[in-house]
Each structure stands twice: as C-alpha cells, then as structure tokens.
Amino acid sequence: MKSRTFLLGISLVGAGALFIYFGLHHIFILPQPAPATSATVAAPRSRTFASRSDEQGEVSVEVQPIKIETSGQAQFTVTLNTHSVELNDDLTKQTALYDDQSHFYKPISWTGAEPGGHHRSGTLTFGPLNSQPQYVELKIKDVGGIPLRTFRWDLK
C-alpha cells in the first residue's frame, strides 16, 4: 500500500512538473510580440469587389475590380468573349469611369490581349479618384453591337 501511495505521489509530482513546463513555459520563456506603439502603423486592408457581367448581344463582358482607391490607381480586369465577331475594340477609347460626384475618368492604360480574336482579357488602369465617392460606374460603349454597358460598385 505504501509503495502504491509513493508511486501515485511521484506520478502526480511528475504530471505537475510536465504541466508547468509545457503549459506555462511559453508564457515566461518564449519571446512575446512587442506591444503596439504609436510608431506601429497597421497595413491597410484591401477591399474586394464582386465581378459584374453583361451577356447582351454577341459579346459577353465581365469586369472584376482589382482595386478602387482615392490614393492610388483604380484597376479593373475586363474579359470579352464571343464566338461570332472579332474583338477589335480599343477599350481605352470606349471606356470611362464615373462616380456619384459627377467626376469622369478616362483609362490611362490597357495591359492585356491586343485587338482581334474571340477571347480578350486585360487590365484597364485609371488614375486616382478625386474624392471619396459613394459608388463608381464603369461604362463601356459599342462592344458587340450594344451601345452602352454599365457596371456599378458601391464603395461605402
């Protein structure tokens, strides 16, 4: 009986020692992250926006915002697909970005597939927005026989 009590006591002491070592060791021994100071600046959270599609006419158009910022460029991935006409459109001349405060922005560049073919995709880039708009609308004229396609995103 004494030997059983002794083994039980040793087991409890061993279990306690393991608990203290493994359970509390990281609190007192491992380095802790430095507390935030006024010099620490949080990274801005990037916002994601849903893609918008327009299936009118012979050409389907999908637009996916990459970023829409007042402090930087606004960028959109534009994808055109068809099986019946050549995609010879110059999207830098047929596209404009509008906001709710009557500002109008022309694209500064297109990076992507050149005109031609049945499938095109690329990035339209605009300069920074002039204000903090409630929404923006990307308008594309005369693609696939459709006079105007409008894609809208709420920003607030």
Image (spheres, rainbow, N blue to C red):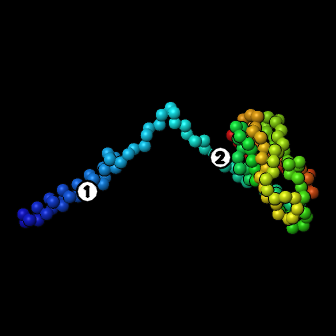
Residue extending furthest toward the bottom: 83
Q: Is residue 114 left or right of 24 when viewed as pictured?
A: right
Q: Of 108 and 20, which appears nearest the observer?
A: 108
Identify residue for label 2.
47
Q: Amino acid at mark 1?
A: Leu
8 shown above or below 152? below
Which class describes the residues within 10 Å of circle 2: few (<14), some (14-19), or many (20+)?
few
Front in this rendered view, residue 49 or 94: 94
Question: In percent of the image, x 71 and y 50: which residue is there?
Answer: 66
Could you tell me which secondary element the residue under label 1 belongs to?
helix
Q: Is residue 7 left or right of residue 33?
A: left
- The correct choice, above or below, for 36 with respect to 51 in the image is above
Q: Is residue 23 above or below residue 8?
A: above
Q: Residue 61, position in %: x, y?
A: 82, 57
**SS for tag 2?**
loop
In which quadrant of the rendered image does the C terminus lie?
Answer: top right
State the image quarter where residue 98 is shown.
top right
Classify 10 Å Cα crowding around label 1: few (below 14), some (14-19), many (20 and above): few
Residues under labels 1 and 2: Cα distance?
Answer: 46 Å
Q: Is there a contact, CB below 8 Å, between mark 1 and mark 2?
A: no
Give percent across and percent down for residue 110. Answer: 81, 51
User: What amino acid is labelled 2 in the image?
Assistant: Arg
- Residue at the spot x=55%, y=39% of the render? 42
Return the residue at label 1. Answer: 18
- Going from the N terminus, do you reach mark 1 or mark 2 first? 1
**Is there any visible trace of residue 53 in the rendered image?**
no
User: Most extreme residue toward the top, as rendered?
Assistant: 38
Left or right: where 32 falls relative to 66: left
- Where does residue 10 sit, x and y in percent of width and height? 15, 60
Write the residue at 76% across / 34% down.
130
- Is residue 125 visible in the rendered structure shown here? yes
Q: Quadrant of residue 71?
A: top right
